[in-house]
Amino acid sequence: MALKLSQRKQLLTERKNAGQRITIGFTGIADLRHFIGLEYIKGMMKAASDYDINFINMGAAVKYSLFDDLNFISHYSKNFKFMKAPFLDGIVTWAASLSEFMDHLSIEELFGALSPLPMVDIGHMDIPGATMLKIDSSSSIKIIMDHLINVHHYKKFAFVGTNVSEPQIRRRLNFEHELARNNLPLIDGAVVMMDKKMEAKNIDAAFEQLNST
């Protein structure tokens, strides 16, 4: 890993000295009311600073108001014509962030058309030609449950998620698996899967439902 890192920095230095400074872009639609999108962008900006390269944030924020442009996604998609050489040397994509606006096949076609531009995707979808960095929900849920059970000795658990998110559906299944592995009961009404995205008002309603169980 140290050798690869040194080679990477040498390449960046050579490109910069030749007047060909590397530029990396980011594309995705972030809900800035949630910390995940902000943390992704913050991390990419730090990496760009650490490696001394250009970073162009081509992402967009979710529209909040009914008065916002109803054709938001079609306008945003026009940005993709700039996601190629010579504007960019590579791009970080968050394809899954478009899933509330487009079906999966359309998303795959939209991002697949960016090839041969080097891509790293940080979502849960499989994009042809992209390197995928995915959250391991199975290991994460296991670590969380082991900590709560073995350190804090909790025995009663609830799960709140949404059916419109594939990762959350997988986490719910992992949650139920961990309950069974630890010989703990799945309490009636303690799993609430909303048919809406995870907004504060929907989460509050879910917890009200749990409290009435």
Image (tube, helix red, strand yellow):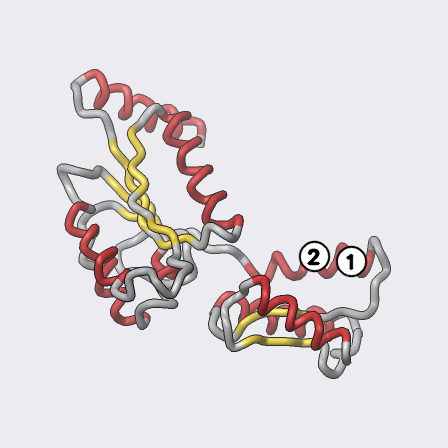
| Disc 1 residue type (three-letter) | Leu
Marks 2 and 1: in contact by CB < 8 Å?
yes
> Which residue is at a point 51% across and 55% down the rendered structure image?
135
Q: Tell me the quarter of the picture where residue 194 sits.
A: bottom right
SS state under label 2: helix
Where is mark 2, residue-wise?
A: 144
> Which residue is at a point 54% across and 57% down the rendered structure image?
136
Q: Position of residue 143 (x, y in %)?
A: 68, 56
Question: Is 148 located above or below residue 156 in the figure?
Answer: above
| Disc 2 residue type (three-letter) | Ile
> Which residue is at a point 32% across and 44% down the rendered structure image?
26
Report whether 73 appears left or right of 85: right
Report whether 139 appears left or right of 114: right
Question: Is 54 located above or below residue 95 in the figure?
Answer: above
Q: Residues within 10 Å of mark 2 (few under 14, many from 20)?
A: few
Task: Work out which quarter of the rendered image holds the N terminus and state it.
Answer: top left
SS state under label 1: helix
Report whether 72 appears left or right of 203: left
Task: Work out which quarter of the rendered image holds the C terminus and state it.
Answer: bottom right
Where is mark 1, residue-wise?
A: 148
Q: Tell me the quarter of the picture where residue 57 sits.
A: top left
Q: Residues within 10 Å of mark 1 (few under 14, many from 20)?
A: some
- Comparing 165 with 183, the one in front is 165
Report whether 103 appears left or right of 44: left
- Residue with the most extreme front position: 67
Question: Label 1 vs label 2: CA separation?
Answer: 6 Å
Task: Note whether residue 7 is visible.
Answer: no
Residue 165 circle label = none
Q: Position of residue 130 (x, y in %)?
A: 30, 53
Q: Tell me the quarter of the picture where residue 126 sits.
A: bottom left
